[in-house]
Each structure stands twice: as C-alpha cells, then as structure tokens.
Amino acid sequence: MSNKSSIVKRDEAAGRVASIYTELQISRMNVSLPLPSVLKNTFNVVDDAASSAAGDPEEIKKLFPKFYGQPSARLVECDPMACTLMENKSLKIGVVLSGGQAPGGHNVISGIFDYLQERTKGSKLYGFRGGPAGIMNCKFVELSSEFIYPYRNQGGFDMLCSGRDKIETPEQFKQAEETVKKLDLDGLVVIGGDDSNTNACLLAENFRSKDMKTRVIGCPKTIDGDLKCKDVPISFGFDTACKTFSEVIGNVMTDARSSGKYYHFIRLMGRAASHITLECALQTHPNIAIIGEEIAAKKLTLKNVTDYITDMICKRSEAGYNFGVVLIPEGLIDFIPEVQQLIAELNEILAHGGVDRDGVWKKKLKSQSQELFELFPEEIQKQLLLERDPHGNVQVAKIETERMLIQMVEAELNKRKKKGTYKGQFTGQPHFFGYEGRCGFPTNFDANYCYALGFASGALLHAGKTGLIASVGNLGEPVEEWTVGGTALTSLMHVERRHGKFKPVIKKAMVELEGKPFKTFASLREDWTIKNLYASPGPIQFSGPTANDINHTLMLELGQGQPAQAKLNK
C-alpha cells in the first residue's frame, strides 16, 4: 500500500449539492445548534483521578505503558481573569470516520471545524477519505466552511465516507506515522465504535512512544448502543436509529392488526448487544421481544427460545388472535450458550486451516456442537461458515435468524396441531431492519449531542490531551447544562480472543438485566403478549412537543424513569 499524498479536489469529493435539497434538508442544514454553557465560555481542562481498566489491568498496562492509568479530564467553566489560558495558536487537525455509519457523524465534524474557527484562528482541518485506509494512503481533503455546509444536520457519512480497515501491522503504523508527519498534524480525531476507538488508543500509544506531537482523541459512535460507560452515557446514532426502526415497527404492527393473519418476525441490527431491540420494544410494545442477554443468563437452548415463541402464539390463538409481532436482536444466536460454543469452535477451525469440501473438518467439533450444527437448516449452516468480519466475528447480519425461527416455530406448531393442542393459523413474515436506521436525519438529541462531541474533541486537542474519548454528560438536562470532558480510553479496555489471538479491545456494554430499562420492559411484557397494546411512534419530529424527547433507555439509565414509565403506561 503506497503512502503518496492524494489531495481530493472539492468537485470530486463534495458529492452533495444544496441547491437541489428538499425543504426539510434546507431547514435542517440551516438550524443553529445550542452548545453546553462551558463550551461557550472560558474554561480550564482539569484532570480527574488516575484510571484503571475495565478488565485484565496487568495485560492492558503491558500493552499501553504510556497511557495506562492516565486520568480522565473535564472542562470547568472559569472566570477569564482566573483561567489558565490555552495557547491561541493555529492547529492542524485530522478527522476520520471509521466503521459503520451512524446519524450525526457530520455534526461531529462540523463541531470540530467550528471550534477550531472560533478558538484557534488559522487552523486547518483535514478529512481522511474512506476511513482508516485514507490515513494509510494519505488520501484527504482540506475542509472549509463551504465544503461542510451542505452536510450540517444531515444523515450519512458521505462527507468523507467511512471504512472498516484497521491500522494494526507495523507497516500500517508506519504509513500512519508518515501521513501525520507529512501533514504536520497536531491532532487526529477518530470517530468510531469500540474497535475503532481501540485503534485510536493504539495509535496514540504508538505516536507517544516515538515522541511524535500528534495527539489522538476518540469519539463514541455506534447505533448498537454498546459503547458506553458512566462517563460516556451513550454512543451517538442510537437515538435516531431506534426512533427510525420504531416508526417502521409501528407501521408493521398496524398492518398486522389490519390483516389479522400474519406474524411478523423482525430482526433488528445490533450484533453484540440487544439495546436496540430493548429500546424499540419500550417504544412500540410488541407481543414478544427476545433479549439476548436474558437468553444467555438463563442458559436457554435454541429449542427453549422456539418453544417460548410457540407458546405465545398458542395463547394468542386461544384468545382469537392469529397475528402478532416478534422482535429479535441481530446477534441472537451468539447469546445461546450451545451456539456460542459452536461458534467459538468454528472460529478456531476457520482461523487454523478452514473447512474442506469433504466435511472432515467437522470431526474437529465436539460431539454436542456437531449435533447442533447438523440440526440447523442447510442455509444457516452456510451462513455460519461465512468469512469472519475484520474483527474476527461471525457476520450475524448475514444469518437470517428471523427465517430460521419462523421455520422452527412452524414445525413445532404443526406437531401441536397433530396432537390437537393448537388449532390456529400461522403465517410468518420475515423482516430485517438495519441499514435503514444508519443514515437518517439525526434527531434533535443526536444533532446536538454530536455537535457538542465535536466541540469537545477540538477542546481536548487544543488543551494537549491524547488517548481520551470525548464525553458529554448530564444529558437529561437542557443542552446548556450538559457537562463536557474526555475519558481515558484504556479505562474502557480488557482483553479478548480474536482470530485465535488475545487482543486489547474496549469492553462492550451489554444490556444489564438488573438495569432500569430491562426491568421496566420485564414488568410490562406480559401485558403486551396477549393484549394488542401496540404503540406507533410515527416519524421523527424536529419541532413540537415530542421533538426533544430522548430514548427511554437513556432516560431510565439517568434515573429519570418516571416520565418514561408514565408514557409506557398510557
């Protein structure tokens, strides 16, 4: 891979033409966004106490000797006369979009740009094209107010485009070093999920170990909602994606009630955690929602899950209903212990030699895993053997769990029909909602949150910070009262086995079964099973009484559960 500089011309990269925008696009583009009070005034950046790690602290300490234990930081408003003023010099900053798209990414970039324009006159912001590969190939565009303008408050990542490449080999780190030296970068902002921010920390460690001046700040992005902790209460894009999915789920529910003859099995994006499924359930009240973390905790088998759904269908049939809606997390099969074991064994086989046409590889599976593999429909078997993603994970988006469950439920219902214990009618309709939620107009919450994250990233780099992930808190209050800071990336990490090797990664935040969101859902789901208490949230609103409502999950986690509970009980 070469490292020749490639400056992208404006007409080649811009892509969007505001003159053909719809009224809504123009309206959103011209919205003036609020900022937390601390970002509008003079502030100091204050260090907090030393940090540790989310797990395996000794291993993380060995892997990140320059950063392990470093404190998080927070912005504190102060009197201009008493503040330690940051040096007012121009900066050269790079920004990259990494991983899957999430609504609000453009606002993060807009926030970084606006901070630099307001606080560090003469600064330059370079956008790397196509994700981390743009850093390695030194393919970039210098961002200007004219270039950024058509993307403000718009969905998508097409301002720069993203990518799933990782900077992990010695050669790739060298290419990244050459790029930041060529551009004389003072800082780099990596906008991404858990793996991308792990990569950001590895870059920061590499740069500091070589006494390079380039500092690295991460930014929490993923619609899956599994990149969060006490100081990073939510990843951007989750709010918008859940509201987008919930609108369509509400439409499907109305269709189910109208026809009275279909069971809609809806698989929702979210590979590792069930946050999206849980939030959409809280917003729409399906007849059943499977939460993967509960399946894992109860050590349920695939047959247990099938019987659970089948029992619900039988009960509804007795009540006169032959229709319903079932929500399924994308990564369901990853949560079933027997399937987890099978996948772990398959991962090792694929990492060391792969599979042969004659099926001799199956002898490497334990007998229980071999039996389970043979139970799956042939199409699911093929999907389980697909090439792993860049992070070493099963590509669960390509495993049509909803179709598999329809087949298994239908088979069980036929057995019960023969026994005379089921007399209803069953027709399953499969759906997968995923990509539809990644690039919509960001909600007011995501638009404001991302803009603040961009400003925060600029402020942290201006203050000379590195190895942190931008954090904005106190999100249940008006924007002016939000808090701003940066959290030590190493404090979020532990060690996982990937591609047959142990690697440092940011620990995913799973649905907590003792947390308020799940407990609220658990207290209500029995009523939803038989009673058709479907809620239809409708399209995302940008003005009016519900425009600034944030998702139930965040509200409940912030301890502001009463308003959300009241809405759910209406």
Image (cartoon, rainbow, N blue to C red):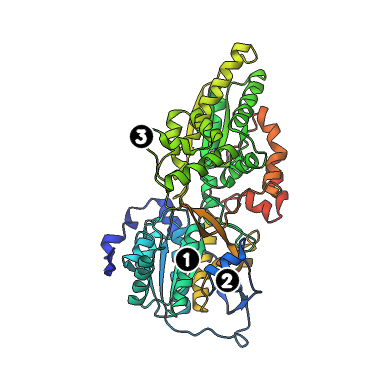
Mark 3 lies on residue: 357
For label 3, the crowd category at 10 Å Cα-Cα, with few meaning under 14, some 14 to 19 and many 20 or more, is few
Can residue 541 be seen in this snapshot?
yes
Q: Amino acid at mark 1?
A: Ala
Residue at 58% in and 71% down: 68
Residue 280 versus residue 504: which sits nearer the camera? 504
Q: How many marks?
A: 3
Q: Earlier in the sequence, mark 1 or mark 2?
A: 2
Q: Nearer the viewer, mark 3 or mark 2?
A: 3
Mark 2 lies on residue: 68
Mark 3 and mark 2 residues within 8 Å of each other at the beta carbon: no
Mark 3 and mark 1 residues within 8 Å of each other at the beta carbon: no
What is the C-alpha distance between the residues marked 3 and 1?
40 Å
380 on left or right of 130: right
Q: x, y percentage for residue 276?
A: 56, 45
What is the C-alpha distance between the residues marked 1 and 2?
14 Å
Q: Amino acid at mark 2?
A: Tyr
Q: Quadrant of the N terminus?
A: bottom left
Q: Quadrant of residue 474?
A: bottom right
Question: Compared with residue 354, is residue 55 higher up or lower down, i.e. above or below?
Answer: below
Mark 1 lies on residue: 200
In the drawing, what numbered circle is on residue 319? none
Question: Compared with residue 188, is residue 502 higher up or lower down, i.e. above or below?
Answer: above
464 on left or right of 52: left
